[in-house]
Amino acid sequence: MASPIIDTEGLTKDYHLGPHTVHALRGVSVTFERGEFVAVMGPSGSGKSTFMNLLGCLDTPTGGSYVLDGERVAGLSPDALARIRNAKIGFVFQQFNLLPRTSALENVELPLLYAGLTARERRSRARTRLESVGLADRASHHPSQLSGGQQQRVAIARALVNDPAVILADEPTGNLDTRTSVEVLALLQRLNRDGLTIVLVTHELDIAAYASRSLTFRDGRLKNDDRTAKPRDAAATLAELPVEEDEAA
Ligand code: ADP
Ligand code: MG
């Protein structure tokens, strides 16, 4: 049997603010199998971002263990964490985080700068990824020349270009209107069906409904872990939504 992609045991994170200690995570044990699409829910301050930062090797836990794709992560040096992060994690953010005066293609190429490829290989891989998110004809556009949905698709192509083991998305539809949000979810669902593991933070039940599993955090603890055999299908939702004029082009 394949090992889980993510396995945490008693994960804790304390923040020290002067004399005070904030217990942001109070012992989270959870396992994600390869190919899962997991939504992370919970009220503000419940520990969602702290949890995602630990999963993404952006921060180190105070206690507990974390195994990512077979590698024991807790306790590694910042350099080792950065190496694992570059190789295994693709990040997608609410604000897209694209470089402004840089083409879509160059934005997607960025994570490959450290991969030891030739310029031609980088370009070719980035182009393939842009095609896979339906943006082949926008390769030379700058972010300001793209809609919000297109910018998020560029960001998803960038997150995928290193062939990561998992995509971590923090409120990826938070800045998008309803139809565009569902388009982004349709893309994520397609990638997930092709085998990609996705962990997505959202505070909207309507968005979490597209995931096959929902975790709910409360006060730094995992309160609920629900699986659904039949998540909503974003492509089907799209077919029922009216097309707006400016999106028809
Ligand atoms: P969420 O993403 O669910 O809103 P967070 O993980 O951001 O929650 O925060 C969990 C708790 O940890 C909150 O009480 C927050 O104030 C605290 N916290 C988060 N980051 C820091 C930090 N860098 N320093 C101190 N406290 C923090
Ligand atoms: Mg947060």
Image: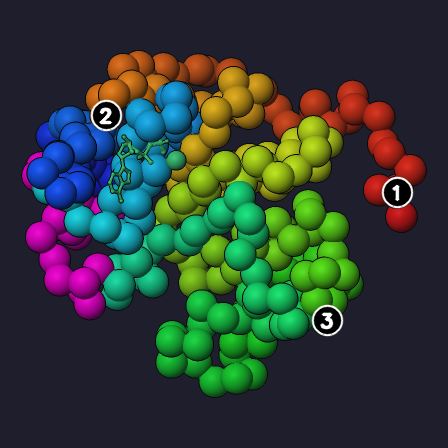
Residue 71 on image: x %, y %: 17, 52
**Amino acid type indicated by mark 3:** Ser
Is disc 3's CB within 8 Å of ligand 2?
A: no
Q: What span is in magenta?
A: 63-81
Task: Please provide percent x and percent y for residue 32.
Answer: 29, 33
Q: Residue 140 carries which label?
A: 3
Percent x, y of residue 109: 53, 71
Which residue is outermost to the front? 19
Residue located at (72% from left, 71% from top):
140
Quarter of the image for residue 131 reads: bottom right
Look at 61% across and 56% down and name the residue there: 154
The answer to whether the residue labelled 2 contacts the one labelled 3, judged by CB atoms less than 8 Å apart, is no
What's the CA distance linking mark 3 and mark 1?
A: 21 Å
Q: How crowded is mark 1: few (under 14 residues within 10 Å), some or many (20 or more)?
A: few
Q: Which amino acid does label 1 sit on?
A: Asp
Q: Distance between the residues labelled 1 and 2?
A: 43 Å
- Give the tally of numbered discs: 3
Q: For disc 2, does the CB lie below 8 Å from ligand 1?
A: yes
User: Would residue 229 be seen by someone viewing this image from the given angle?
Assistant: yes
Residue 5 on the magenta segment: no
Gap between marks 2 and 3 measured at Cα: 43 Å
Query: Would you name the residue on which mark 2 appears?
Result: 220
* Res. 246 mark: 1
Q: What element carries label 1?
A: helix
Quadrant for ligand 2 reads top left
